[in-house]
Amino acid sequence: MSADEKADHEVATDEDLMRLALEEAALAAREGEVPIGAVVTCEGKVVARAHNRRETDRDPSAHAEFRAMEQAARELDRWRLTGCTVYVTLEPCLMCAGLMVNSRVDRCVYGAADPKAGALGTLYDVSHDPRLNHEFEVTGGVLADDCATLLRDFFRARRAR
């Protein structure tokens, strides 16, 4: 049974859902985009999937998780993403973590930590800043090696060209 089928028929694990995000990241790589993918679930059901498209769309906000949260809001017909979990292959940046606060997600699960821009614990911790109007749960390191390898291989190949 594929991760997609499993997600549709039974309670999927964080690893199952991160594998879906990795599928999105692989799509980004095939398009020449930095391979980051995201999935949003609401009450256990996948409601959105997306990958990076900054180069293709010439849009600085076209990060995988940002696009997935926008898609989830449209699918759910509401801007509050209460009851939702965002799965993303790389720790979110300040912009995306800020959107998680503003959309009131319940949880974010990420793969690889981002030492250059991570805003959910590495450089900043936007998810638990008492000065903000919302806090959410974070689980990092899910399939971290797979997520980091995809990024590392992409940039290695890019440098070789």
Image: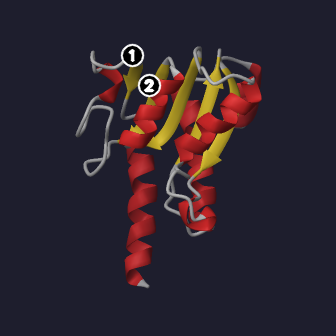
Indicate the quadrant where residue 122 lies.
top left
On residue 133, the disc is 1
Residue 121 rendering spot, x and y as whole percentages:
27, 32
Residue 95 rendering spot, x and y as whole percentages:
42, 42
Q: Name the kind of residue labelled 1 in the image.
A: Asn
Q: Furthest-bottom residue in view?
A: 161
Is residue 1 visible to the viewer in this orientation of the structure? no
Tag 1: Cα neighbours inside 10 Å, few (<14), some, or many (≥20)? few
In this rendering, position of residue 54 left or right of residue 2? left
- Secondary structure at badge 1 equals loop
Q: Name the kind of residue labelled 2 in the image.
A: Val
Q: Earlier in the sequence, mark 2 or mark 1?
A: 2
As displayed, is residue 144 above or below residue 59? above
Q: Furthest-left residue in view?
A: 123
Residue hosting label 2: 101
Do tag 2 and tag 1 residues touch (Cβ < 8 Å)?
yes
Q: Residue at x 48, y 26 (%)?
A: 102
Alpha carbon of mark 2 to alpha carbon of mark 1: how far? 7 Å
Tag 2: Cα neighbours inside 10 Å, few (<14), some, or many (≥20)? many
Is residue 35 visible to the viewer in this orientation of the structure? yes
Indicate the quadrant where residue 94 lies.
top left
As displayed, is residue 28 above or below residue 138? below
Front in this rendered view, residue 161 or 144: 161
